[in-house]
Amino acid sequence: MSRIAYVDGRYLPHRRAGVSVEDRGYQFADGVYEVIAVLGGRLVDEDLHLERLNRSLDELRIRWPMSRAALRLVMREMIRRNRIRAFGSLYLQVTRGVSPRNHAFPTSAEPVLVMTARTLPPFDLEAAKRGISVISAPDERWRRPDIKTVSLIPNVLAKQRAVESGAFESWLLDVDGMVTEGTASNAWIVTEGGDLVTHAADRSILAGITRTSLLRLAREHGVRLVERPFSLVEAKRAREAFLTSTTSWVKAVVRIDDATIGNGAAGPLTRRLLDWYTAYVAGDGETSR
Ligand SMILES: Cc1ncc(COP(=O)(O)O)c(C=O)c1O
């Protein structure tokens, strides 16, 4: 079955799906995006994703390409047309539109919405508990990574460094040696004293939706948590570490550069958080039907 993309009002097979060479997303990275998990045919944390999309659009002064209700319908139609049943993801991107190349905003362009969807292999809980390695890398992004723009080249380069080092992710360090987040995930540690720590959702990180939901679950279960920066040195000495994202859920981090974290597998709090998150996504998400 061929995959179907949504491009500016039309559902097209991927091989025929394309945007204009003068789309500002293509020429200036002048656009924003979201990635939403689909589980059991349902969109996980749909409202939170649409709220974040709204904020990103607002920050860049791009109009909604259609009403929120219409966007929800297109998302459901994409899940249906691409037959995403068990686990998958939906990518949606809104750019400022098509216009002859000029840095200043065009006066008449309409925002362009593009959407793709894909089926993913079932989430591998055992692999998430076995854990992954991360390396540290300088955070070379612009000063508004809290906006989910398609301008991702520093993230791409840092992720590639991780891959070439045999690691899953890079944890990005600010000029003070503090871990901000990963290239496509948020970073967490459990301190020696047992506190759950992650960077506050200020302007220096993306407020991950998985992060938001996990913070809520942790609070509900009475976990002691602190939103503050932590250094690479503190991370390497942490009792536990993990990362979160829409498609990674909660993944134990068992190695940071050359340091082994804990006993080299997911620690007890990481396991509990993964269990709570798994139960949450299995039961939550609004129906796509
Ligand atoms: C830079 C960055 N931080 C964090 C995340 C995690 O966000 P979410 O949990 O919404 O997937 C992402 C996701 O792509 C990201 O790109």
Image: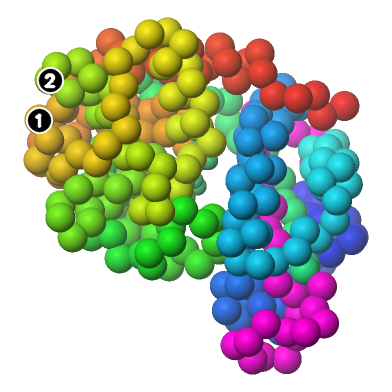
Q: Is residue 61 magenta?
A: no
Q: Which residue ends up furthest to the top in the rendered image? A: 221
**Amino acid identity at mark 1:** Arg
Tags 2 and 1 touching, CB below 8 Å: yes
**Snapshot quadrant of residue 35:** top right
Mark in the foreground, 2 or 1: 2
C-alpha gap between disc 2 and disc 1: 8 Å
**Amino acid identity at mark 2:** Glu
Q: Can residue 124 be seen by looking at this rendering?
A: no
Q: Residue under circle 1?
A: 237
User: Range of the magenta residues?
Assistant: 82-110
Name the residue: 77% across, 58% down: 64
Q: SS class of the residue under badge 2?
A: loop
> Which tag, 2 or 1, sits closer to the chain's start?
2
Q: Quadrant of the N terminus?
A: top right
Who is closer to the viewer here, 139 or 130?
Answer: 139
In the image, is 130 to the left or to the right of 75? left
Taking 23 as reference, is 54 above or below it? above
Q: SS class of the residue under badge 1?
A: loop
Residue 45: where, in percent of width, then height?
A: 64, 30
Q: Residue under circle 2?
A: 192
